[in-house]
């Protein structure tokens, strides 16, 4: 780990001196991220696969903290309060500074609001609480359970002030995740942080991903043995003028993929003189 830190410090010093990073330094930087991912990070702890997020693993909060430790990044936050009487909302800018030099390395922007689905509603404690809540502050939500089953949940609106601290922490977290990916240029290894995705949206994306039609599998290569066995019959059809070479190829290709050499042999067959008449 000390070698990785020293390597990154050298790259940073060279970048500050020349105003840019050399190609070797960029390669070393990317290699550092990949090496840390292999040697230090653990699946489902520092990164994980989020349904609907594509093939890239998603960087989790613990993984971002590891990258900050490796590259000596200190995070500083600038909070913008956009709250209204009915909604708590924060926009946060996370600034990444190098711990050794104090140089600003980059920043990231994050926002959170009590108007988000997972913060806006909560499950009613009991039937009486649901019925005694004004109609405009309650709802019945249809949700999907295991095995494709569905069920109903009685929910009521949350009090924005009760979750103000939670919303602020989430805005800070999102800003830090964006900053870490920007500063470390780790987006080629990790997708954006999606672990806080709403459960309903995540479920929808997962089902959409599973329902996608599978790509058709390619036909197996036409074997040389079968090709040599059937070639005389194909040549007879072409020489007699009953079929062209391309028509034979089209028919055979429905049963197996022809190689370039096999295609050339079929196309080399010449129609006999007078066969067309």
Image (tube, rainbow, N blue to C red):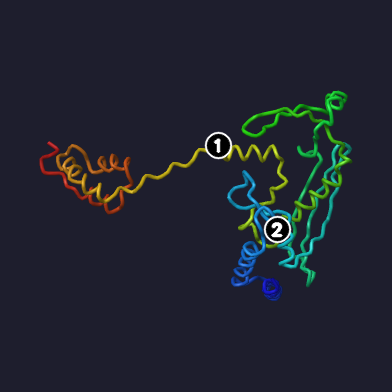
Q: Which residue, as the protein is rendered here, is positioned at the far left?
A: 274
The residues tagged by marks 1 and 2 sit, at their Cα atoms, a distance apart of 31 Å
How far across and how far down the image is residue 135, in percent? Answer: 83, 24
Query: Tag 2: Cα neighbours inside 10 Å, few (<14), some, or many (≥20)?
Result: many
Image vertical order of residue 88 relative to residue 63, above or below? above
Q: Which residue is drawn at 67% across and 29% down?
A: 150
The tag earlier along the polypeptide, 1 or 2, is 2
Q: Which residue, as the protein is rendered here, is positioned at the far front?
A: 147
How far across and how far down the image is residue 203, in percent? Answer: 65, 38
Q: Nearer the viewer, residue 128 or 108?
A: 128
Q: Nearer the viewer, residue 95 or 127?
A: 127
Q: Residue at x 80, y 36 (%)?
A: 120
Q: Is mark 2 on a helix, strand or loop?
A: helix
Q: In this view, does 144 lie to the left or right of 83?
A: left
Residue 51 sits in quarter: top right
Q: Mark 1 points at which residue?
A: 211
How far across and how far down the image is residue 160, in percent? Answer: 86, 39
Report how many numbered discs are placed on residues in the image: 2
Residue 239 sits in quarter: top left
| Quadrant position of the C terminus in the picture | top left
Image vertical order of residue 83 relative to residue 45, above or below? above
Query: Tag 1: Cα neighbours inside 10 Å, few (<14), some, or many (≥20)?
Result: few
Q: Which residue is drawn at 32% across and 44% down?
A: 256
Q: Is residue 155 left or right of residue 230?
A: right
How far across and how far down the image is residue 113, in percent? Answer: 80, 42
Is there CB contact under 8 Å for labels 1 and 2?
no
| Quadrant position of the N terminus in the picture | bottom right
Q: What element carries label 1?
A: helix
Q: Mark 2 points at which residue?
A: 63
Mark carried by residue 19? none
């Amino acid at each position: 780990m000390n070698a990785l830190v020293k390597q990154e410090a050298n790259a940073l010093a060279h970048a500050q001196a020349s105003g840019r990073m050399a190609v070797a330094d960029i390669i070393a930087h990317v290699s550092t991220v990949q090496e840390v991912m292999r040697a230090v990070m653990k699946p489902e702890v520092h990164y994980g696969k989020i349904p609907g997020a594509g093939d890239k693993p998603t960087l989790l909060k613990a993984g971002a903290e590891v990258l900050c430790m490796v590259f000596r990044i200190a995070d500083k936050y600038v909070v913008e309060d956009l709250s209204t009487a009915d909604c708590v909302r924060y926009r946060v800018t996370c600034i990444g500074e190098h711990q050794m030099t104090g140089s600003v390395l980059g920043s990231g922007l994050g926002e959170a609001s009590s108007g988000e689905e997972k913060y806006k509603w909560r499950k009613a404690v009991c039937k009486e609480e649901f019925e005694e809540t004004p109609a405009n502050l309650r709802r019945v939500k249809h949700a999907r359970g295991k095995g494709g089953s569905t069920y109903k949940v009685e929910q009521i609106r949350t009090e924005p002030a009760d979750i103000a601290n939670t919303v602020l922490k989430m805005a800070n977290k999102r800003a830090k995740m964006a900053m870490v990916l920007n500063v470390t240029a780790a987006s080629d290894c990790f997708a954006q942080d999606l672990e806080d995705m709403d459960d309903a949206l995540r479920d929808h994306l997962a089902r959409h991903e599973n329902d996608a039609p599978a790509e058709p599998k390619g036909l197996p290569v036409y074997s040389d043995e079968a090709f040599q066995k059937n070639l005389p019959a194909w040549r007879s059809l072409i020489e007699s003028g009953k079929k062209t070479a391309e028509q034979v190829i089209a028919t055979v290709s429905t049963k197996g993929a022809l190689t370039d050499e096999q295609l050339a042999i079929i196309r080399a067959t010449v129609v006999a003189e007078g066969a067309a008449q």
